[in-house]
Amino acid sequence: MVETMTAPGSDLALVFHFGSRSGGYVALAFFGSMFAALGWAVARELRRRVGMRRSWAAAVGFVLGSALLALTYLSSLDGFYEAELRGTSLTFHYLIATTPRIMPLESIADVRGTPAFRGLWRLRVVSSRGGDYESATSDRDVVKAASERLRSVIANLPPPR
């Protein structure tokens, strides 16, 4: 989804939305709860069957639950959920990161849509400085519209001085 917005005292901004940020939070809470329960059950069984000390069993359960949640986040929920085009910079807003990442438009080397899984796509923005940024998964049409619009904006940039 693409929306145009204005902020008081600033120029026009173009915001691209990928995936559902609230859906990402719900999924994170659901899987976090599920993996916390699994970690707790593993810790309990380690104490009962193996006779492991309570602190060690809790540590193993915590590491297991945390690792599974991290794998779920990295495989399905990772990526920026909003890309805000304002002036000559593109700002990426992530699900968890509190500080957005800002990229000058002149440093963008490539913008393209890439297939992810189950018919979903990701927008991939490659920086000439070596950075590689991917969006959250979204519909193909949303990713295609965003990549075409960004390529158009980049093509119309004034030449560097």
Image (spheres, rainbow, N blue to C red):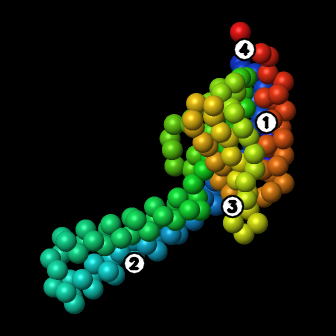
- Assign a secondary structure to mark 3: loop
Q: Secondary structure at mark 2?
A: helix
Residue drawn 64% across the image and 61% down it: 23
> Where is residue 122 shown, x and y percent of the image?
70, 53
Q: Are marks 4 and 3 in contact (CB under 8 Å)?
A: no
Which residue does the numbered mark 2 point to in the structure image? 38
Viewer-closest of 137 and 6? 137
Of the numbered discs 1 and 4, the one sitting upstream in the chain is: 1
Determine if residue 87 is in view. Answer: yes
First of labels 3, 1 by sequence position = 3
Front position among marks 1 and 2: 1
Q: How far apart are the alpha carbons under marks 4 and 2?
A: 55 Å
Tell me the element at label 4: loop
How far apart are labels 3 and 2 at the CA level? 28 Å
Residue assigned mark 1:
150
- Examine the rendered structure and indicate whether residue 73 appears above or below residue 103: below
Amino acid type for the residue under numbered disc 1: Leu
What secondary structure is found at the residue carrying circle 1? helix
Q: Is residue 93 visible?
A: no
User: From mark 1 to mark 4, how far is it between C-alphas?
Assistant: 18 Å
Which amino acid does the dot numbered 3 rest on? Ala
Label 4, label 3: how far apart the Cα atoms are: 34 Å
